[in-house]
Image: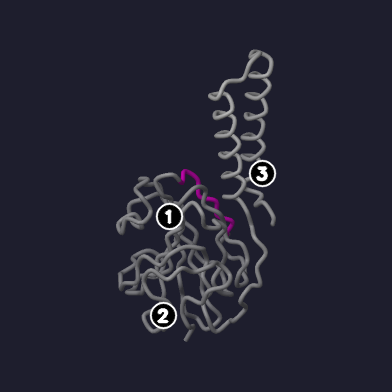
């Protein structure tokens, strides 16, 4: 199992703080009480949770250019028709994936294509599973044109705990299916906005995995 580069600094800081606290207790305390052991155990558990959050487990990617593959781990919380005024400027199907603290939080491109649109938008930090968080929360939007001319948009949405969205997308670059698109730290969601004629392959409450689970057919 690998650790994502976005987490290395945070992990070093948390481990460093734990080490400093441990040394301070050793130097100032002659007799450890139950509280000391409990406190150190809590710090170590927290360190383990931070490492677990930034994990990148080994996976066999699904490579199928006739399908959109999930850009994120998580649970399908929204499948509905919406109008998107930015980039797509049309009615489309929104498929939203909610990521909790146990999911892998790396985001990947769902298809091959050309990045034509990248925008960061400031906003609130409502719980990411809240339906309106897609439009109200801080977010990054990435518009992609497929080889057949169709356009999709991927939206990274911050949650109540997520305070930083990392997006590697750049306008004009050619991207590949399952290539890393970004990372959202500590709970969030990813929205896909697709043409109305793309058959959807998932249902509400399905659990999907990035680079593995098909979301829709490309037509």
- Residue 163, relative to residue 146: is it above or below? above
Q: Which residue is mark 3?
A: 8
Q: Secondary structure at mark 3?
A: helix
Q: Are marks 1 and 2 in contact (CB under 8 Å)?
A: no
Residue 157's disc is 1
Residue lying at 47% horizontally and 86% vertically, measured from the top left: 219
**Structural crowding at the residue carrying mark 3, measured as other residues with C-alpha within 10 Å and reported as few (<14), some (14–19) or many (≥20):** few
Q: Are marks 3 and 1 in contact (CB under 8 Å)?
A: no
Residue 200's disc is 2
* Residue 60 position within the rendered picture, expressed as x and y whole percent measured from the top left: 66, 72
Q: Main secondary structure of the magenta part?
A: loop
Taking the image as shown, residue 161 lies to the left or right of residue 167, namely: left
In this picture the colour scheme is one colour
Q: Secondary structure at mark 2?
A: loop
- Residue 112, relative to residue 180: is it above or below? below
Depth order, front residue of 187/149: 187
For the record, the magenta segment spans 162-169
* Residue 76 position within the rendered picture, expressed as x and y whole percent measured from the top left: 40, 67
């Amino acid at each position: 199992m690998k650790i994502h580069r976005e987490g290395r600094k945070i992990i070093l800081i948390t481990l460093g703080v734990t080490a400093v606290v441990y040394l301070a207790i050793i130097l100032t305390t002659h007799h450890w009480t139950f509280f000391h052991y409990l406190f150190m155990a809590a710090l170590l558990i927290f360190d383990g949770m931070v490492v677990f959050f930034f994990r990148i487990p080994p996976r066999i990617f699904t490579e199928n250019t006739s399908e959109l593959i999930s850009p994120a781990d998580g649970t399908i919380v929204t499948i509905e028709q919406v109008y998107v005024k930015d980039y797509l400027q049309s009615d489309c199907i929104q498929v939203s994936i909610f990521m909790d603290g146990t999911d892998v939080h790396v985001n990947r491109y769902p298809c091959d294509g050309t990045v034509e649109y990248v925008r960061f938008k400031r906003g609130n930090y409502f719980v990411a599973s809240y339906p309106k968080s897609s439009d109200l929360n801080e977010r990054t939007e990435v518009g992609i044109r497929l080889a057949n001319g169709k356009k999709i948009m991927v939206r990274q949405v911050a949650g109540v705990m997520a305070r930083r969205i990392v997006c590697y997308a750049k306008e004009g670059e050619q991207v590949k299916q399952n290539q890393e698109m970004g990372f959202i730290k500590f709970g969030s969601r990813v929205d896909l906005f697709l043409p109305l004629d793309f058959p959807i392959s998932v249902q509400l409450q399905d659990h999907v995995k990035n680079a593995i689970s098909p979301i829709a057919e490309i037509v």
